[in-house]
Amino acid sequence: AQSVTQLGSHVSVSEGALVLLRCNYSSSVPPYLFWYVQYPNQGLQLLLKYTTGATLVKGINGFEAEFKKSETSFHLTKPSAHMSDAAEYFCAVSEAKDWSGAGSYQLTFGKGTKLSVIP
Amino acid sequence: NAGVTQTPKFQVLKTGQSMTLQCAQDMNHEYMSWYRQDPGMGLRLIHYSVGAGITDQGEVPNGYNVSRSTTEDFPLRLLSAAPSQTSVYFCASRERRLLYYEQYFGPGTRLTVT
């Protein structure tokens, strides 16, 4: 089974500082990888995803992530943190599950990293 | 489009009671799923559906039932509520079963079982 490990359940950065949220995955096949953001009392919103092709993926709100196969990592970065970036961030990996031979792909989520931005 | 809607937003149940969490989407999405979110656990898949009349179990299905009679609706039923089912429940949908289609989440239902 595929799995996701997010290093650090809480990360604090100063406003204007680099944001780095770490995600490592395990997969026996080339994965699809995702980052989602959850603002307080809201549902999850897709930030960015990697499926195939370019390993540096750009998302919304200035975030980007790089797929590194050799390191089995998909870390999320943003050059300069804003107060509005304070939220919980979830890394997720695809997991193929056969259903009647058609295939049905599930997301396996990490446990989340809560980002605080200090003024 | 309203996207993915969930009702109710909040619910308090007593142990042993049953209830149905409603989920609807107006995007004609083929795939729908239910997750529960617990502190420090991330999101865990309860049940999913790849189309009307087709459902399957996820990672944590015990104590929950689902059905999919229409493309739009995917209700989650708690048969006999237990305190361990206190959680935030999210419904999600995507256009097709393949994952390069974006998955959209509803706003969640916060359930407390006493």
Image: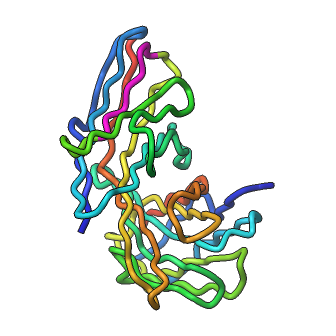
Q: Residue at x 39, y 64 (%)?
A: B86
Name the main secondary structure of what is drawn in magenta. Answer: strand
Q: Residue at x 55, y 71 (%)?
A: B97
Quarter placement of the C terminus of chain B: bottom left
Q: Let me know if residue A19 is in the magenta part.
A: no
Q: Is residue A80 above or below residue B75?
A: above
Q: In which quadrant of the rendered image does the N terminus of chain B lie?
A: bottom right
Tell me, yes or no, if residue A29 can be seen here: yes
Assess whether residue A80 is covered by the magenta stretch: yes
Residue shown at the point (25%, 38%) measured from the top left: A9
Q: Quadrant of residue B108?
A: bottom right
Camera-side residue of A79 and B33: A79
Write the residue at 44% across / 82% down.
B64
Looking at this rendering, what residue extends furthest in the front direction?
A: A53
Locate residue A89, reporting x and y percent.
Answer: 40, 39
Res. B16 visible in picture: no
Q: Position of residue B60 (x, y in %)?
A: 34, 75
Report the magenta residues as a range: A74-81
Left-right relation of A58 to A117: right
Q: Position of residue A76 (x, y in %)?
A: 36, 32
In the image as oriented, which residue stretches furthest toward the right? B1
Q: Quadrant of residue B63?
A: bottom left
Is B111 on the left-hand or right-hand side of A28? Answer: right
Residues B80 and A45: in front is: A45
Coloring basis for residues: rainbow
